[in-house]
Amino acid sequence: MIKGLVFNIQRFSLHDGPGIRTAVFMKGCPLRCKWCHNPEGLRSSPELEYNPAKCIGCGRCSVCPKGCHVTENGVHEFDRTNCVGCFACVESCPAGALLQAGREYTVDEVMKTVDSDRAYYENSGGGMTLSGGEPLLQPEFSGALLKAAKERGLNTAIETSGYAPTDVIKEISPLVDVFLFDVKLTNEEDHKKYTGVGRDLILSNLRFLNDEGREIVLRCPIIPGVNDDELHFGAIADLANELDSVVRVDLEPYHDLGSVKYAKFGREAGFSADPPSKDRMEEIREYVQQKTPKRVKIS
């Protein structure tokens, strides 16, 4: 039985492909983008999430066999040092302050949720989107989900960094209606600096999908102080013009909603900036639109 690690299944999603969709967020990612707003999706294993704002100081988490939780006079102290991820504390927490981020799902379990919203897909042109993390890091599970969705006649989309073995891309390509393909940076040195990986494999896979005639939406995060310059914007337009299969360019403004999540996993956010204003995003959109006939929109 094929299983995969999922950290969220979001129903009625309006920003992960055409129409109304169910987005399946897979755990694990080979990139380490400094501005990542889904830190719970980075590691390829379940993690303990702790939100001190919800803690009621009941002390029930002391069930931890490693003594990671100590509560005295209603004050809870949590030391992750010896945590082995048994999640006994999660089961004992009545307030939802302790949660398990990521659990194994079978294909049937995921599709049961996907199937429950079929009426919305049919009326809106929606369907199922695989996101993450990086869904191509779990190729067998992703392939099985996409196959199950296509067997049901559903539209399929995948949000990907493109950083995966080309054989994986070739295998899943026929099962995907829309590729939401990330273009994070267009400078090789900056790409390595801010994501931890180079661009060669990503661009090779992008061009393969283009040659196969797969529908591609370029998704371009706009990160203040990192890639918000005309050189980058022009390179985005050039890439869109080079690839016949690109149907649209989505500009995604940086937001800092993920910064508070890092502390819940015992980590520090690697990036902080003021989000670009609506006026600034419109300036960028107009600049890119002037250089390409492809539709450019702000997500």
Image: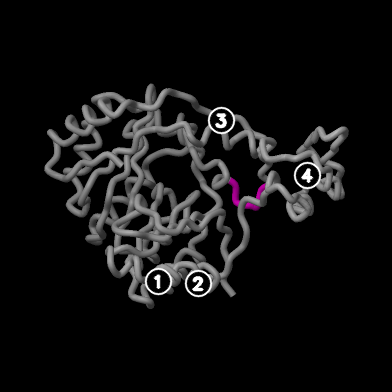
* Between marks 3 and 2 in the image, the one whose residue lies nearer the viewer: 2
Q: Residue at x 37, y 46 (%)?
A: 202
**Farthest residue, direction bottom:** 151
Q: Amino acid at mark 1?
A: Ala
| Residue 17 found in image quarter | bottom left
Give percent across and percent down for residue 207: 27, 51
> Earlier along the polypeptide chain: callout 1 or callout 2?
2
Query: Which label sits in the foreground, 1 or 2?
Result: 2
SS label for mark 2: helix
Q: Quadrant where the N terminus lies? A: bottom right
Q: Amino acid at mark 2?
A: Lys
Q: Which residue is mark 3?
A: 269
Q: Are marks 3 and 1 in contact (CB under 8 Å)?
A: no
Q: Is residue 42 above or below residue 196?
A: below
* Alpha-carbon span between mark 1 and mark 2: 11 Å
Task: Quarter of the image for the C terminus: give it.
Answer: top left
Q: Earlier in the sequence, mark 3 or mark 2?
A: 2
Identify which amino acid the numbered label 4 is placed on.
Cys
Task: Indicate the position of residue 275 as horizontal and vertical percent values.
Answer: 39, 27
Toward which corner of the image does residue 209 lie, by quadrant? bottom left
Residue type, numbered disc 3: Ala
Query: Which residues lie in the magenta part?
Result: 43-47
